[in-house]
Image (cartoon, helix red, strand yellow):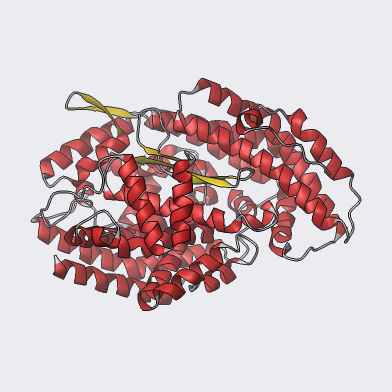
């Protein structure tokens, strides 16, 4: 089969379903056998690469500028015309392969995912999935348009975050007041979007004959190796092992800051009283120094990142009408990843680029696999790739190691990183436990007031170290400000599991740097071609939900925090 290819990316972005349809029809017409299945898979992979890159390019265009009407129209055209036809055509090819009973070597995991997808596929759900994409786009526009006036200047939400790191507590409190007040102004519109999300997701599960949306989503996300019960076990382990440690750190922070209770705006300031970290003054400096760090870790990684910079595949600066957050996506046909972030000059920006860099390297390393269906790792391991990169690069934050800081400031940055890591586990558990409650009780959750009440209870369970007195409404509505809850339901436990895996790789790195990096890269190159527990094992870690592995890691991090505090 001769796969038709566009002359360039811009031509691809204007393709219609009529450009893809003949190739899918030709694939469907092939009589499969053991002798031709590998060539057929190669052709299918090539066509799928084109379709996926078209979607990802258009999605990127809508996020880099949420006011770009041309990009928005092209994206809507894709999800309205191409997406449902594509889903149907892909499903037919999956069914064709499954009914052939052929099992090509190295294709075991893609086949397992296809069987799961086939079980829940319903043509009635295609328009609902299109509607869900539209609500996602609307949500991005709301979040991307949030700005405040500060000292007479218009600032994005992200541009206000450095103020939460200022030593002046009144300045931090004032900035937080302005910021949280602005975010509450969109409460009603986000609540209305939320009700649309719930209705769509209940219908998706019902149409697919699933007990509830969680069961539907579990199968959609190909979660073969753990259950909702395992997630709840992990929540309990975090409550027992991590929350007490975080409470102790919070009390030490209060003592060092000379305050009685810890407010949200006290979490990010350096308690030493030194000025906030300033890792870079412009985005190009951020790019250059991250390239240097990646080179120190492994020259191949530095080469990948430098290539992305040269080819314009990094959009890192924050600006108005840019979607919130950060992500990495892969342009499958071009075999290039793309990084999106919102840098404003704080250390968190460094960690974001290192994190997304890990995703990029996962993509680059897995591009050698012959079929696109093999390349996508389970998200629980994709986040090991990204969080693992954060942990591995800690050693290179000082300028003498190619990084951003003096030795003292590098120690401050590492201390901030480890404290944030420990605080993250309880927050992750809060977000994940909230979503379990939502989809166990969808009718209750359809009322945002009930969501506010649930979130408040979970805050008290997992983050008792934060004093929210006088800011109860801000606290109760924390779920409105977490994009994953709205746009990527149940996609958050991955971060908690992956951080535990990444921290184990960090412990390995301290014993033998070369071996740890080699194991990490070996696992990245496998993409999604082997089971999730095997990916962890090959990377040098264990997929764990109980308190044993977590306790070992938390103790090591707490010891390192004490060493860094003593050095400062």
The percent coordinates of residue 278 (x first, y second) are 21, 47
User: Which residue is located at x 42 percent, y 75 percent?
Assistant: 549
In the depicted view, which residue is nearer to us: 479 or 289? 289
Q: Is residue 270 above or below residue 163?
A: below
Can residue 432 be seen in this snapshot?
no
In the depicted view, which residue is nearer to us: 483 or 56? 56
In the depicted view, which residue is nearer to us: 313 or 68? 313
Going by the image, does 242 lie left or right of 60? left
Among the 4 quarters of the image, the one containing residue 325: top left
Q: Quadrant of the C terminus?
A: bottom left
Q: As drawn, which residue projects farthest toward the left?
A: 258
Q: Is residue 440 above or below residue 235?
A: above
Q: Quadrant of the N terminus?
A: top right
The percent coordinates of residue 237 (x first, y second) are 40, 69
Going by the image, does 313 lie left or right of 464? right
Going by the image, does 298 lie left or right of 44? left
In the depicted view, which residue is nearer to us: 193 or 386? 386
Among the 4 quarters of the image, the one containing residue 13: top right
User: Which residue is located at x 38 percent, y 52 percent?
Assistant: 291
Going by the image, does 308 lie left or right of 245? right
Q: Is residue 362 above or below residue 513?
A: above
The percent coordinates of residue 175 (x first, y second) are 20, 37
């Amino acid at each position: 089969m001769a796969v038709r290819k566009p002359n360039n990316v811009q031509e691809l972005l204007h393709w219609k379903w009529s450009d893809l349809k003949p190739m899918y029809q030709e694939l469907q017409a092939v009589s499969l056998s053991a002798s031709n299945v590998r060539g057929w898979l190669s052709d299918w992979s090539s066509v799928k690469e084109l379709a996926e890159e078209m979607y990802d390019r258009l999605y990127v265009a809508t996020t880099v500028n949420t006011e770009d009407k041309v990009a928005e129209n092209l994206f809507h055209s894709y999800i309205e015309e191409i997406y449902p036809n594509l889903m149907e055509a892909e499903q037919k090819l999956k069914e064709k392969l499954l009914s052939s009973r052929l099992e090509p070597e190295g294709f075991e995991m893609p086949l397992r995912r296809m069987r799961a997808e086939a079980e829940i596929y319903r043509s009635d759900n295609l328009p609902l999935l299109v509607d869900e994409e539209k609500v996602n786009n609307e949500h991005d526009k709301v979040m991307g348009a949030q700005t405040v006036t500060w000292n007479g200047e218009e600032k994005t939400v992200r541009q206000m975050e450095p103020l939460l790191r200022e030593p002046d507590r009144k300045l931090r409190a004032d900035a937080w007041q302005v910021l949280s007040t602005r975010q509450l102004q969109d409460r009603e519109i986000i609540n209305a979007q939320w009700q649309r999300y719930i209705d769509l997701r209940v219908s998706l599960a019902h149409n697919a004959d699933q007990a509830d949306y969680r069961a539907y989503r579990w199968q959609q996300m190909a979660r073969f190796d753990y259950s909702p019960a395992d997630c709840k076990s992990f929540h309990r382990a975090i409550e027992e092992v991590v929350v007490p440690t975080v409470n102790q750190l919070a009390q030490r922070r209060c003592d060092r800051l000379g305050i009685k209770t810890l407010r949200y705006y006290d979490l990010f300031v350096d308690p030493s009283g030194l000025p906030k970290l300033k890792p870079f003054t412009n985005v190009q400096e951020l790019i250059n120094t991250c390239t240097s760090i990646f080179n120190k870790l492994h020259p191949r990684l530095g080469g990948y990142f430098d290539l992305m910079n040269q080819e314009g595949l990094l959009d890192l600066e924050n600006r108005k009408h840019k979607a919130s957050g950060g992500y990495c996506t892969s342009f499958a046909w071009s075999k290039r990843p793309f990084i999106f972030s919102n840098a404003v000059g704080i250390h968190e920006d460094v960690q974001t680029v290192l994190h997304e860099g890990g995703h990029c390297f996962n993509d680059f390393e897995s591009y050698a696999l012959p079929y696109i269906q093999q390349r996508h790792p389970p998200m629980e391991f994709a986040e090991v790739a990204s969080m693992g990169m954060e942990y591995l690069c800690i050693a290179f934050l000082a300028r003498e190691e190619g990084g951003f800081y003096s030795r003292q400031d590098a120690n401050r940055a590492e201390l901030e990183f480890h404290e944030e890591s420990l605080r993250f586990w309880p927050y992750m558990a809060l977000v994940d436990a909230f979503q379990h409650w939502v989809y166990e009780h969808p009718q209750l959750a359809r009322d945002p007031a009930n969501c506010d009440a649930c979130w408040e209870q979970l805050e008290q369970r997992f983050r008792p170290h934060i004093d929210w007195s006088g800011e109860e409404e801000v606290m109760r509505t924390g779920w409105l400000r977490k994009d994953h809850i709205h746009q990527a339901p149940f996609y958050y436990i991955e971060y908690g599991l992956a951080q535990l895996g990444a921290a184990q790789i960090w412990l390995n790195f301290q014993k033998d740097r070369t071996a740890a990096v080699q194991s990490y890269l070996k696992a990245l190159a496998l993409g999604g071609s082997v089971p999730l527990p095997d990916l962890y094992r090959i990377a040098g870690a264990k997929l764990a939900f109980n308190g044993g592995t977590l306790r070992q890691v938390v103790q090591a991090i707490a010891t390192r925090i004490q060493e860094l505090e003593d050095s400062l």
